[in-house]
Amino acid sequence: AQTVTQSQPEMSVQEAETVTLSCTYDTSENNYYLFWYKQPPSRQMILVIRQEAYKQQNATENRFSVNFQKAAKSFSLKISDSQLGDTAMYFCASPRGTSYGKLTFGQGTILTVHP
Amino acid sequence: DTAVSQTPKYLVTQMGNDKSIKCEQNLGHDTMYWYKQDSKKFLKIMFSYNNKELIINETVPNRFSPKSPDKAHLNLHINSLELGDSAVYFCASSQKAGQQYFGPGTRLTVT
């Protein structure tokens, strides 16, 4: 079975500090995307960052970056200079076969940023 | 402009009723999805349509029936609602295996 594992159910960080959320996945695809989504209390699912597996360079979006280790099937999210608005549930997602975007989501990590 | 919209956002109904949730996307995507998010926030795919054709049908009770009148719309009809159907239902769309854009979700409460 193809799975995505987020081993940290909850994390907390002080404002302005850095936090890393971990994710491991299992896919049989060769070329694929990996995603981190954020779900704030408003429940809207918002894309944070995506990584193309064939690119060795780690993706970066402003304060968000990933540490992508393809051989280890690891895809962690680093949030720098944490802000109160980063408080949310974070989901890692990886593909489950086919080219039609079938994704498996991890269990989620609740991140709380404290002032 | 809203990229992916769902109606209604909240739905409260009694057991045994039949209800529908509508979804529309204006992104020109070929593929649309329905996800269910349970009380523990676990997000699981239910169905996927590509150009009006059903391509993913997870293990979902046949009381759930998706319908795609065109590639911009994907509706979800639920018959004989049960307490366990209470959840948040998300519609999403993508262009093939790219980023999925999610709607705001529909919170369904069955009493």
Image (cartoon, rainbow, N blue to C red):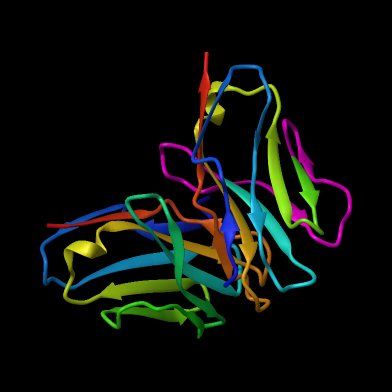
Which segment is the magenta one? A38-65
Name the side, left or right, on which B34 lies relative to A94.
left
Picture coordinates of residue B86, whole percent (x, y): 25, 59
The answer to whether residue A89 is above or below residue A56 is above
- The answer to whether residue A42 is magenta is yes
The C terminus of chain B lies in quadrant: bottom left
- Observer-nearest residue: A72 or B93? A72
In the image, what residue occupies the spot 34% across and 72% down? B76
- Observer-nearest residue: A15 or A10? A10
Residue lying at the far top in this picture: please name it: A115
Name the side, left or right, on which A36 lies relative to A54.
left
Place residue B17 in its image quadrant: bottom left
Name the side, left or right, on which A15 lies relative to B40.
right
In the image, what residue occupies the spot 74% across and 57% down? A73
Residue lying at the far bottom in this picture: please name it: B53
In the image, what residue occupies the spot 55% across and 65% down? B93
Picture coordinates of residue A115, whole percent (x, y): 52, 13
Name the side, left or right, on which B13 lies relative to B25.
left
- Observer-nearest residue: B91 or B58? B58
- Observer-nearest residue: B78 or A19? A19
Place residue A8 in its image quadrant: top right
The answer to whether residue A4 is above or below residue B97 is above
Picture coordinates of residue A107, whole percent (x, y): 49, 51
